[in-house]
Protein backbone atom coordinates (compact mmCIF):
# COMPACT_ATOMS: atom_id res chain seq x y z
CA UNK A 1 0.00 0.00 0.00
CA UNK A 2 1.06 3.62 -0.42
CA UNK A 3 0.98 7.18 0.85
CA UNK A 4 0.13 10.34 -1.08
CA UNK A 5 1.45 13.82 -0.32
CA UNK A 6 0.49 17.15 -1.84
CA UNK A 7 3.08 19.83 -1.17
CA UNK A 8 2.02 23.44 -1.75
CA UNK A 9 0.17 22.44 -4.89
CA UNK A 10 -1.01 25.35 -7.05
CA UNK A 11 -2.86 25.55 -10.35
CA UNK A 12 -3.55 28.83 -12.18
CA UNK A 13 -5.29 29.24 -15.52
CA UNK A 14 -5.12 32.15 -17.94
CA UNK A 15 -2.69 35.02 -18.33
CA UNK A 16 0.25 35.22 -15.95
CA UNK A 17 -0.60 38.84 -15.15
CA UNK A 18 -4.19 38.04 -14.20
CA UNK A 19 -4.54 34.31 -13.53
CA UNK A 20 -7.55 32.41 -12.29
CA UNK A 21 -6.25 30.37 -9.35
CA UNK A 22 -8.13 27.09 -9.12
CA UNK A 23 -5.95 25.52 -6.41
CA UNK A 24 -3.76 27.54 -4.10
CA UNK A 25 -1.04 26.23 -1.76
CA UNK A 26 -2.78 22.89 -1.15
CA UNK A 27 -0.86 20.62 1.21
CA UNK A 28 -1.91 17.41 2.93
CA UNK A 29 -0.87 13.77 3.31
CA UNK A 30 -3.05 10.72 2.76
CA UNK A 31 -1.91 7.80 4.89
CA UNK A 32 -1.40 4.23 3.75
CA UNK A 33 -4.82 2.61 3.27
CA UNK A 34 -6.71 5.80 4.16
CA UNK A 35 -9.93 6.91 2.47
CA UNK A 36 -9.79 10.70 2.13
CA UNK A 37 -12.67 12.78 0.74
CA UNK A 38 -12.08 16.20 -0.79
CA UNK A 39 -15.32 18.09 -0.18
CA UNK A 40 -16.47 21.50 -1.30
CA UNK A 41 -18.93 23.46 -3.44
CA UNK A 42 -18.74 23.59 -7.23
CA UNK A 43 -15.73 25.55 -8.42
CA UNK A 44 -13.69 25.14 -5.24
CA UNK A 45 -10.83 23.34 -7.02
CA UNK A 46 -11.38 19.80 -5.73
CA UNK A 47 -11.56 18.13 -9.17
CA UNK A 48 -8.59 20.16 -10.39
CA UNK A 49 -6.58 18.89 -7.43
CA UNK A 50 -7.56 15.31 -8.27
CA UNK A 51 -6.64 15.77 -11.93
CA UNK A 52 -3.20 17.04 -10.91
CA UNK A 53 -2.70 13.89 -8.85
CA UNK A 54 -3.76 11.79 -11.85
CA UNK A 55 -1.56 13.78 -14.25
CA UNK A 56 -4.35 15.22 -16.40
CA UNK A 57 -3.46 18.75 -15.24
CA UNK A 58 0.06 20.06 -14.79
CA UNK A 59 0.64 21.99 -11.55
CA UNK A 60 1.70 25.61 -11.85
CA UNK A 61 3.88 24.95 -8.82
CA UNK A 62 4.18 22.52 -5.95
CA UNK A 63 4.62 18.78 -5.89
CA UNK A 64 2.74 15.48 -5.78
CA UNK A 65 4.51 12.58 -4.12
CA UNK A 66 3.62 8.89 -3.84
CA UNK A 67 5.64 6.95 -1.28
CA UNK A 68 7.92 9.96 -0.98
CA UNK A 69 8.75 10.12 -4.70
CA UNK A 70 7.65 13.01 -6.93
CA UNK A 71 5.37 12.00 -9.81
CA UNK A 72 4.74 15.38 -11.47
CA UNK A 73 7.12 14.56 -14.35
CA UNK A 74 5.49 11.17 -14.99
CA UNK A 75 2.76 11.04 -17.67
CA UNK A 76 -0.72 9.92 -16.58
CA UNK A 77 -0.50 6.46 -18.15
CA UNK A 78 2.74 5.74 -16.29
CA UNK A 79 1.62 6.90 -12.85
CA UNK A 80 0.71 4.35 -10.16
CA UNK A 81 -2.82 5.77 -10.02
CA UNK A 82 -6.19 4.87 -11.51
CA UNK A 83 -9.19 7.14 -11.82
CA UNK A 84 -12.94 6.59 -11.78
CA UNK A 85 -14.79 9.45 -13.45
CA UNK A 86 -18.22 10.97 -12.94
CA UNK A 87 -19.24 9.68 -16.35
CA UNK A 88 -18.59 6.00 -16.80
CA UNK A 89 -16.43 6.50 -19.94
CA UNK A 90 -16.86 2.89 -21.03
CA UNK A 91 -16.20 1.99 -24.64
CA UNK A 92 -19.66 1.21 -26.02
CA UNK A 93 -18.38 -1.13 -28.76
CA UNK A 94 -16.52 -3.32 -26.24
CA UNK A 95 -18.02 -5.92 -23.97
CA UNK A 96 -17.66 -5.50 -20.21
CA UNK A 97 -14.82 -8.03 -20.14
CA UNK A 98 -12.87 -6.13 -22.80
CA UNK A 99 -13.44 -2.77 -21.13
CA UNK A 100 -11.84 -4.09 -17.95
CA UNK A 101 -9.08 -5.98 -19.77
CA UNK A 102 -8.05 -3.01 -21.94
CA UNK A 103 -5.44 -1.58 -19.58
CA UNK A 104 -3.93 -4.99 -18.88
CA UNK A 105 -3.58 -5.68 -22.59
CA UNK A 106 -1.70 -2.39 -22.99
CA UNK A 107 0.75 -3.77 -20.43
CA UNK A 108 1.16 -6.90 -22.58
CA UNK A 109 0.29 -9.29 -19.78
CA UNK A 110 -0.19 -12.97 -20.63
CA UNK A 111 -3.70 -13.91 -21.68
CA UNK A 112 -4.16 -16.31 -18.76
CA UNK A 113 -3.17 -13.61 -16.28
CA UNK A 114 -5.54 -11.11 -17.88
CA UNK A 115 -8.37 -13.66 -17.67
CA UNK A 116 -7.69 -14.26 -13.98
CA UNK A 117 -7.45 -10.57 -13.09
CA UNK A 118 -10.58 -9.57 -15.01
CA UNK A 119 -12.66 -12.38 -13.50
CA UNK A 120 -11.52 -11.43 -10.00
CA UNK A 121 -12.35 -7.77 -10.66
CA UNK A 122 -15.83 -8.68 -11.89
CA UNK A 123 -16.48 -10.77 -8.80
CA UNK A 124 -15.22 -7.94 -6.61
CA UNK A 125 -17.94 -5.61 -7.93
CA UNK A 126 -20.62 -8.34 -7.99
CA UNK A 127 -20.77 -8.58 -11.79
CA UNK A 128 -19.33 -12.05 -12.24
CA UNK A 129 -21.82 -13.02 -14.97
CA UNK A 130 -21.77 -9.72 -16.88
CA UNK A 131 -18.51 -10.08 -18.83
CA UNK A 132 -20.22 -10.74 -22.18
CA UNK A 133 -22.63 -7.80 -21.99
CA UNK A 134 -22.20 -4.42 -23.65
CA UNK A 135 -22.38 -1.17 -21.64
CA UNK A 136 -25.74 -0.28 -23.23
CA UNK A 137 -27.18 -3.43 -21.69
CA UNK A 138 -26.29 -2.27 -18.17
CA UNK A 139 -27.93 0.09 -15.71
CA UNK A 140 -26.12 3.22 -14.57
CA UNK A 141 -25.07 1.56 -11.32
CA UNK A 142 -23.75 -1.50 -13.16
CA UNK A 143 -21.77 0.68 -15.56
CA UNK A 144 -20.15 2.48 -12.65
CA UNK A 145 -19.27 -0.86 -11.09
CA UNK A 146 -17.52 -1.76 -14.35
CA UNK A 147 -15.63 1.55 -14.24
CA UNK A 148 -14.50 0.79 -10.68
CA UNK A 149 -13.42 -2.73 -11.70
CA UNK A 150 -11.49 -1.30 -14.68
CA UNK A 151 -9.56 0.97 -12.29
CA UNK A 152 -8.95 -1.67 -9.62
CA UNK A 153 -7.75 -4.33 -12.05
CA UNK A 154 -4.67 -2.17 -12.70
CA UNK A 155 -3.73 -2.54 -9.03
CA UNK A 156 -2.93 1.15 -8.55
CA UNK A 157 -1.15 2.45 -5.49
CA UNK A 158 -3.69 5.30 -5.28
CA UNK A 159 -7.34 5.04 -6.34
CA UNK A 160 -8.86 8.37 -7.45
CA UNK A 161 -12.62 8.92 -7.74
CA UNK A 162 -14.19 12.09 -9.13
CA UNK A 163 -17.85 12.27 -8.01
CA UNK A 164 -18.47 8.76 -9.38
CA UNK A 165 -22.02 8.43 -8.04
CA UNK A 166 -23.44 11.88 -8.81
CA UNK A 167 -25.40 10.65 -11.86
CA UNK A 168 -27.18 7.88 -9.92
CA UNK A 169 -30.43 7.99 -7.98
CA UNK A 170 -30.30 8.50 -4.22
CA UNK A 171 -30.92 4.89 -3.16
CA UNK A 172 -28.37 3.50 -5.60
CA UNK A 173 -25.79 6.09 -4.51
CA UNK A 174 -26.09 4.89 -0.92
CA UNK A 175 -25.80 1.25 -1.93
CA UNK A 176 -22.77 1.78 -4.18
CA UNK A 177 -20.86 3.92 -1.73
CA UNK A 178 -21.35 1.22 0.93
CA UNK A 179 -20.00 -1.34 -1.53
CA UNK A 180 -17.09 0.92 -2.44
CA UNK A 181 -16.17 1.39 1.20
CA UNK A 182 -16.22 -2.37 1.75
CA UNK A 183 -14.01 -2.95 -1.31
CA UNK A 184 -11.57 -0.26 -0.22
CA UNK A 185 -11.37 -1.69 3.28
CA UNK A 186 -10.84 -5.24 2.03
CA UNK A 187 -8.15 -4.24 -0.47
CA UNK A 188 -6.59 -1.75 1.97
CA UNK A 189 -6.01 0.60 -0.96
CA UNK A 190 -5.32 4.30 -0.47
CA UNK A 191 -8.18 6.31 -1.99
CA UNK A 192 -9.01 9.96 -2.69
CA UNK A 193 -12.67 10.67 -3.38
CA UNK A 194 -13.96 14.03 -4.63
CA UNK A 195 -17.55 15.02 -3.87
CA UNK A 196 -19.81 18.00 -3.17
CA UNK A 197 -22.20 15.74 -1.24
CA UNK A 198 -21.74 16.21 2.51
CA UNK A 199 -23.56 13.01 3.45
CA UNK A 200 -21.38 11.04 1.04
CA UNK A 201 -18.19 12.45 2.54
CA UNK A 202 -19.33 12.00 6.13
CA UNK A 203 -20.31 8.37 5.56
CA UNK A 204 -17.29 7.32 3.46
CA UNK A 205 -14.22 9.14 4.67
CA UNK A 206 -11.60 8.42 7.28
CA UNK A 207 -10.81 12.13 6.97
CA UNK A 208 -12.35 15.01 5.02
CA UNK A 209 -10.50 17.90 3.37
CA UNK A 210 -12.92 20.81 3.03
CA UNK A 211 -12.02 23.26 0.25
CA UNK A 212 -13.22 26.74 -0.65
CA UNK A 213 -12.00 28.92 -3.51
CA UNK A 214 -9.01 26.67 -4.10
CA UNK A 215 -7.83 26.61 -0.50
CA UNK A 216 -8.00 24.03 2.26
CA UNK A 217 -10.33 25.14 5.05
CA UNK A 218 -10.15 22.15 7.39
CA UNK A 219 -8.76 18.62 7.34
CA UNK A 220 -10.05 16.28 10.02
CA UNK A 221 -12.14 13.23 10.85
CA UNK A 222 -15.81 13.50 9.83
CA UNK A 223 -17.08 13.63 13.42
CA UNK A 224 -14.64 16.41 14.31
CA UNK A 225 -15.48 18.50 11.26
CA UNK A 226 -19.18 18.19 12.01
CA UNK A 227 -18.89 18.88 15.74
CA UNK A 228 -16.12 21.50 15.74
CA UNK A 229 -15.85 23.31 12.38
CA UNK A 230 -12.85 25.61 12.39
CA UNK A 231 -14.44 28.57 10.62
CA UNK A 232 -17.81 29.96 9.58
CA UNK A 233 -17.63 28.53 6.07
CA UNK A 234 -17.15 24.97 7.31
CA UNK A 235 -19.82 25.44 9.97
CA UNK A 236 -22.34 26.62 7.39
CA UNK A 237 -21.34 24.15 4.67
CA UNK A 238 -21.20 20.91 6.65
CA UNK A 239 -24.65 19.78 7.73
CA UNK A 240 -27.54 22.01 8.75
CA UNK A 241 -26.78 24.95 11.03
CA UNK A 242 -28.77 27.80 12.57
CA UNK A 243 -26.65 30.98 12.52
CA UNK A 244 -27.35 34.05 14.68
CA UNK A 245 -25.79 37.48 14.97
CA UNK A 246 -25.07 38.37 18.59
CA UNK A 247 -23.29 40.82 20.82
CA UNK A 248 -20.97 39.59 23.55
CA UNK A 249 -20.67 41.67 26.68
CA UNK A 250 -19.33 40.42 29.98
CA UNK A 251 -20.51 36.87 30.60
CA UNK A 252 -23.41 36.78 28.16
CA UNK A 253 -24.25 36.94 24.50
CA UNK A 254 -27.32 38.94 23.58
CA UNK A 255 -29.46 37.63 20.73
CA UNK A 256 -32.14 40.28 20.67
CA UNK A 257 -34.05 39.80 23.93
CA UNK A 258 -32.48 36.36 24.46
CA UNK A 259 -29.22 35.69 26.27
CA UNK A 260 -26.72 32.84 26.21
CA UNK A 261 -23.65 32.25 28.37
CA UNK A 262 -20.47 33.57 26.75
CA UNK A 263 -17.18 31.68 26.47
CA UNK A 264 -14.76 32.29 29.30
CA UNK A 265 -12.23 34.99 28.51
CA UNK A 266 -13.88 36.13 25.28
CA UNK A 267 -13.58 39.80 24.34
CA UNK A 268 -16.63 42.02 24.00
CA UNK A 269 -17.96 42.64 20.52
CA UNK A 270 -19.91 41.16 17.65
CA UNK A 271 -20.11 37.37 17.46
CA UNK A 272 -21.87 34.68 15.49
CA UNK A 273 -23.59 31.82 17.28
CA UNK A 274 -23.95 28.50 15.45
CA UNK A 275 -26.55 26.00 16.66
CA UNK A 276 -26.98 22.52 15.19
CA UNK A 277 -30.66 21.53 14.77
CA UNK A 278 -30.25 18.52 17.08
CA UNK A 279 -28.54 20.46 19.88
CA UNK A 280 -31.73 21.55 21.63
CA UNK A 281 -33.96 20.17 24.37
CA UNK A 282 -37.70 20.71 24.54
CA UNK A 283 -38.54 22.16 27.95
CA UNK A 284 -40.97 24.45 29.75
CA UNK A 285 -38.31 25.54 32.24
CA UNK A 286 -37.71 29.21 32.96
CA UNK A 287 -35.75 30.98 30.26
CA UNK A 288 -36.81 28.59 27.51
CA UNK A 289 -37.02 29.96 23.99
CA UNK A 290 -40.56 30.17 22.63
CA UNK A 291 -41.76 29.75 19.08
CA UNK A 292 -44.51 28.49 16.82
CA UNK A 293 -44.15 25.36 14.71
CA UNK A 294 -44.66 26.39 11.08
CA UNK A 295 -43.73 23.15 9.34
CA UNK A 296 -42.73 19.62 10.26
CA UNK A 297 -41.56 16.50 8.41
CA UNK A 298 -41.33 12.93 9.63
CA UNK A 299 -37.89 11.63 8.64
CA UNK A 300 -38.11 8.15 10.11
CA UNK A 301 -36.22 8.14 13.40
CA UNK A 302 -36.61 11.90 14.00
CA UNK A 303 -38.68 14.92 13.00
CA UNK A 304 -37.49 18.00 11.17
CA UNK A 305 -39.34 20.99 12.59
CA UNK A 306 -39.30 24.64 11.53
CA UNK A 307 -40.03 27.03 14.38
CA UNK A 308 -40.78 30.73 14.02
CA UNK A 309 -39.46 32.78 16.96
CA UNK A 310 -40.11 36.48 17.54
CA UNK A 311 -36.44 37.25 18.24
CA UNK A 312 -34.49 35.01 15.84
CA UNK A 313 -36.84 34.32 12.95
CA UNK A 314 -37.14 30.76 11.64
CA UNK A 315 -35.07 27.93 13.12
CA UNK A 316 -34.64 24.38 11.89
CA UNK A 317 -34.72 21.77 14.66
CA UNK A 318 -34.34 17.98 14.72
CA UNK A 319 -36.51 16.50 17.47
CA UNK A 320 -37.02 12.94 18.75
CA UNK A 321 -40.20 11.20 17.69
CA UNK A 322 -41.18 11.01 21.35
CA UNK A 323 -41.69 14.80 21.44
CA UNK A 324 -45.27 15.75 20.60
CA UNK A 325 -45.46 18.71 18.25
CA UNK A 326 -48.17 20.01 15.94
CA UNK A 327 -48.03 22.50 13.09
CA UNK A 328 -49.31 25.85 14.29
CA UNK A 329 -48.73 24.87 17.92
CA UNK A 330 -46.27 26.35 20.44
CA UNK A 331 -42.83 24.97 21.19
CA UNK A 332 -40.52 25.80 24.08
CA UNK A 333 -36.89 24.71 23.92
CA UNK A 334 -33.37 25.51 25.02
CA UNK A 335 -29.98 25.11 23.30
CA UNK A 336 -27.85 22.35 24.82
CA UNK A 337 -24.68 23.06 22.81
CA UNK A 338 -23.55 25.84 20.48
CA UNK A 339 -20.44 27.37 18.92
CA UNK A 340 -19.38 30.99 19.23
CA UNK A 341 -17.35 32.54 16.38
CA UNK A 342 -15.51 35.78 16.94
CA UNK A 343 -13.56 37.20 14.01
CA UNK A 344 -11.17 34.68 12.44
CA UNK A 345 -10.52 32.86 15.70
CA UNK A 346 -11.45 29.22 16.17
CA UNK A 347 -14.89 28.89 17.72
CA UNK A 348 -15.56 28.32 21.39
CA UNK A 349 -17.78 25.34 22.19
CA UNK A 350 -20.41 25.82 24.90
CA UNK A 351 -22.38 23.02 26.58
CA UNK A 352 -25.36 23.80 28.79
Image (cartoon, rainbow, N blue to C red):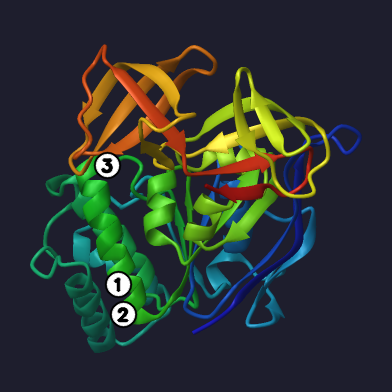
Q: Residue furthest left?
A: 129
Q: Position of residue 210 (x, y in %)?
A: 59, 50
- Which residue is depicted at the point 41% across and 15% down? 308
Q: Is residue 13 above or below residue 88?
A: above
**SS class of the residue under badge 2?**
helix
Q: Which residue is the site of mark 3?
A: 168
Disc nearer the start of the sequence (3/2): 3
Residue placed most toward the observer, 137 or 329: 329
Could one spot residue 118 in this view of the protein? Answer: yes
Q: Position of residue 181 (x, y in %)?
A: 33, 66
The answer for how far apart the CA atoms under marks 3 and 2 are is 24 Å
The image quarter in which residue 329 lies = top left
Could one spot residue 41 in this view of the protein? Answer: no
Q: Is residue 270 above or below residue 239?
A: above
- Which residue is depicted at the point 22% across and 84% down? 116
Crowding at dot 2, Cα within 10 Å, few <14 / some 14-19 / many 20+, comes out as few
Q: Is residue 302 above or below residue 162?
A: above
**SS class of the residue under badge 3?**
loop
The answer for how far apart the CA atoms under marks 1 and 2 are is 5 Å
**SS class of the residue under badge 1?**
helix
Q: Which mark is residue 186?
A: 2
Q: Which residue is the site of mark 1?
A: 183
Q: Position of residue 303 (x, y in %)?
A: 25, 34
The reply to whether the C-beta atoms of the residues labelled 1 and 2 are less than 8 Å apart is: yes
Amino acid sequence: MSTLELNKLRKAFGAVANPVVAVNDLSFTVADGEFLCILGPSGCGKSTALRMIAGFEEPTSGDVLIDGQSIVAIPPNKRPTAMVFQKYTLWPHMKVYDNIAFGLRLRHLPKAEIEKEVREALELVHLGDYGDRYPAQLSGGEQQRVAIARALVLKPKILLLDEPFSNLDALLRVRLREELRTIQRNLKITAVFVTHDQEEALSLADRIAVMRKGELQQLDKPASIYATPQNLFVADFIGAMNMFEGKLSGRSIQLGDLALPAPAGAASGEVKVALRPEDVAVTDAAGAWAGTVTQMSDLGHYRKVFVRTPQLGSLKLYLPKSVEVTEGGPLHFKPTRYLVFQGQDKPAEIHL
